[in-house]
Image: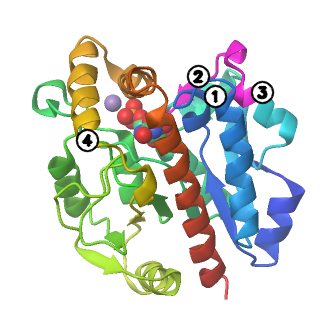
Amino acid sequence: MSTPSITDEVRTALAENRPVVALESTILSHGLPPGRNREVAARLEDVVRAAGAVPATIAVLGGVPKVGLTDAELDHVCDPANDLVKLSRRDLGAAYALKKDGATTVASTSAIARQAGVTVFATGGLGGVHRGARETWDVSADLDVLATTPILVVCSGVKSILDIPATLELLETRSVPVLGYRTDSFPAFYRRESGHAVPWRVDAPEQAAAVVAAHFGQVPGSAGVLLANPIPAEFEMDPDLHDRLLREGLEKTRDVHGKDVTPALLEHFHTASGGVSLDANEALVLSNAALAAEVAVELAK
Ligand code: PSU
Ligand code: MN
């Protein structure tokens, strides 16, 4: 069986019940442009360490699920020449058996992290229900995996390229608790507020950790928890720019399908915004990694 290969640093931290934060690799290989992705990969690990936790970036290399990557492995994941496959949870068996290199999404990162005993995970945006899903049935596997995997995912909500109210409805149906961090509104990635309410609000890492501990420890069932942290105010995207990019992106990707949809939309935002969306993306994912580490520190107490 492909049990995850865990670095010594992460393994020791887990054995000593010290805080560990999982990080995904699809955001690196398919969500950010080359060069910038490697900088963000390093900064993410730095902010997790600065907050007192051990980072565990997850990817599949040579068919082996890796929990914690060396600098050389991060270089490999971030180099477009290596053409990493985007792996959702359903792709893991094929990637292992066929000895592929692949980047993990929220769905597959959650699955591997949990298998390794890591229960806190930071990312940028969660996948969700796409607009037009009534016809296309395009609903990210992230939602289904979150519904069946006891892990805390810290993110900045979902992008407005998705159907946000439908995504929130599905999270409710699948019994995934959604906590707003210092907000009553579910965040929309580039924007701090989607206009849709969160069912619960927490105002400090200790409070978030207490809810997570109660959910995992006292409530039967195995759903994960979503902690939704709005983008730092100074990086929030101008609403007019945001609406224009969104309109154009949806138009441009009308004929894109399956797992290529999300990367294609992200690409459009990054090229058409002249880098504004990249700075926003970096700022929010760093903020989420720091918050995840703070919550992991509280959970380890
Ligand atoms: N949203 C972002 N950036 C990302 C992704 C989503 O703002 O990089 C990635 C994540 O890895 C997420 C995946 O898990 O896309 C969802 O893809 P899909 O919609 O194909 O399930
Ligand atoms: Mn999809």
Name the amino acid type tagged 4.
Ser
Residue topped by disc 2: 85
Task: Give the Cα separation between the discs numbered 1 and 4.
Answer: 27 Å
Residue topped by disc 4: 160
Please name which of the two marks, 4 or 2, marks the residue nearer to the observer. Answer: 4
> Is 86 one of the magenta-colored residues?
yes
Residue topped by disc 1: 102
- Give residue 127's position: percent from left, percent from top: 37, 42
Q: Quadrant of residue 60?
A: top right
When the figure is inspected, residue 293 is found, relative to residue 3, above or below; the finding is: below
Is tag 2's residue or tag 3's residue first in the polypeptide sequence? 3
> Is 233 one of the magenta-colored residues?
no
Describe the element under mark 3 as helix, strand or loop. Answer: helix
Is tag 1's residue or tag 3's residue first in the polypeptide sequence? 3
Describe the element under mark 2 as helix, strand or loop. Answer: strand
Is tag 2's residue or tag 1's residue first in the polypeptide sequence? 2
Task: Give the Cα separation between the discs numbered 1 and 3.
Answer: 11 Å
